[in-house]
Amino acid sequence: KCDLKGRIEAMVKGEPINFTEKRSVLHTALRAKKEQAGTIIAHDGVDAVKEVHEVLDSVRDFTDAIRSGELRGYTGKRLRNIVSVGIGGSYLGPEFLHEVLKTEPDGINSSLGYSLRFLSNVDPVDVERTCADLDPEETLIVIVSKTFTTAETMLNARTMRQWLWDFMGNDKEVVRRHVVACSSVTATDLVKNFGIDTENYFFRFWDWVGGRYSVCSAAGAVPISLLYGYDLFQRFLDGAHSIDEHFINAPFEKNIPVLMGLLGVWNMSFLGYNARTTLPYAEALLKFPAHIQQLDMESNGKHVTRNGQEIDYAVGEIDFGEPGTNGQHSFFQLLHMGQTVACDFIGFVDSQHDLCIDGEQISSHDELMSNFFAQPDALANGKTPEEVRGEGITGELVAHRTFQGNRPSMSLLLPRLTTYAAGQLLSIYEHRTAVQGFIWDINSFDQWGVELGKKLAIDIKEKLITARTDPNQAPVRAANPATSRILNYYVAQSREAAFLEDDEVESLPNPLTEITRKTHRDHYPPEGTGDLGGGAGKL
């Protein structure tokens, strides 16, 4: 009835299955082989594979030039520090991959002498932490925003631009040499107006790539290739492509993403288990659960079918997770004895870096994997009252130490966590999400639920601007009385944080903070050269 095979084929061929936005859904084209050019045409008539490889070739050339020192910063120094500015899918996917490569042997060797940091939160503390101890003259800023209008990302982008200007002066060449954009081709004018060199420092992606599916696009390719080299990123793409081919061609009874998607629908819609946890028994996958959380919840958190009918069956799990064995000491009590949560266990035969301490009978990786194998059995089998009594427990304590069991889990065991395997994992989970959405008859590729909060935040920001500048200090009225009350408290308590003259700032109990710690005073420009921010390294 749901025509799963037909919907999969429609997605990978470029039909506009994201009908609310009239777009194709072609994250699979991001890792297609170059010889597939001409076989996948997007909704806008673009040869998707040809476009993708044009961008990948330019990413390779650019990142090689930065890493070799052919392209340098404004003052002639080599660019060794990368700050990737983005939020949501522009950040979670690339950071998951970065964490995998940090301890992968080839990743360790190729990243020597370079650093990569992510700036995602609009909280100014995130700016402070990101910029701490960085030399602006050796720093390249990568702004990742498909529309180049995302409020949080663009405020952070302007902040980082100001940081560069404060240290090196406001010459337009500072931005042209130190700022890169990864954005949609439709945002070209906005990128150019920001001061970025759109001929050499601008890498496009397309409306048919959703943010949460964009790690295989320039959004991931540029920062990851700058740190680790393009060849490692290509291995990641190859791993993802291998699962794409499996997903498209394997019969359903042997199709890993399809089977996982069917299990997800069964657990959620038939058994009523409304939460699922991702449990990688590999510390290098510590950011993978957060990426899957966005991938699943932003995709399948819907309340109407494709035809606009209110859904009368359960869809869209609550996803969370933590690496093993950390999660065991955090929320496994609930998994074993509280509400039922479907569990995904991910393990590896070999560790990226194993240890075997003198005197220990097994290696550290064996210790880890002992837990990987034991936890699913504990969830499934539990412990009966008879087994508890057999351990000498009596009376009312028996009930407290009984495990009901019959709790669902699924285990994936891969040979080793490599760059290639990371690509395979990504693709498996992307396609699982799509399968569940297809069966539930929802659109997994739009995210209108994100928009309302954004719009209200803009309205509140306008009210804050008025409150900061109103000489009469009239009360602020929000959309409901509770918000109005707490908003007016906030305004009253923080009114002194409004932008004041420099000579007034020092007298405030909460002065404006410096963007970076005073680590690089020797890099400050002579007084007067950075007239957009001054020569003191402050905003």
Image (cartoon, rainbow, N blue to C red):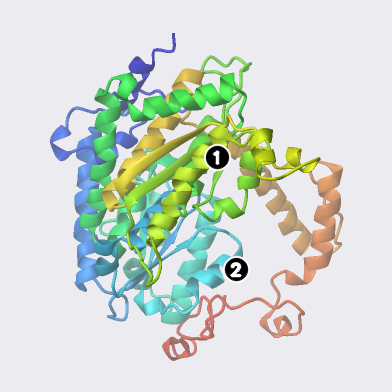
Residue at the limit of the structure toward the left, as seen here: 35
| Label 2, residues with CA under 10 Å away: few <14, some 14-19, many ≥20 | few
**Is 472 on the left or on the right of 428, as rendered?**
right
Residue 162's x, y, as percent?
Answer: 49, 71
Q: Earlier in the sequence, mark 2 or mark 1?
A: 2
- Measured Cα–Cα span from mark 2 to mark 1: 42 Å
Determine the residue positioned at 84% across, 64% down: 492
Residue, x 26% and y 43% (percent of image)? 239
Q: Secondary structure at mark 2?
A: helix
Q: Quadrant of residue 212?
A: top left
Question: Looking at this view, is 530 or 512 the one in front?
Answer: 512
Up the image or down, 479 lies above or below 47; here it is below
As helix, strand or loop, the secondary structure at mark 1 comes to: helix
Q: Which residue is mark 2?
A: 125
Q: Residue at 34% x, 36% y: name it.
A: 27
Residue type for callout 1: Ala
Q: Judge from the rendering whether residue 191 lies leftward or rightward of residue 514; answer left or right.
A: left
> Quick one: quadrant of the N terminus?
top left
Determine which of the numbered discs, if any, sits on residue 214 in the image.
Answer: none
Q: Nearer the viewer, residue 159 or 186?
A: 159
Q: Which mark is residue 378?
A: 1
Toward the viewer: 344 or 298?
344
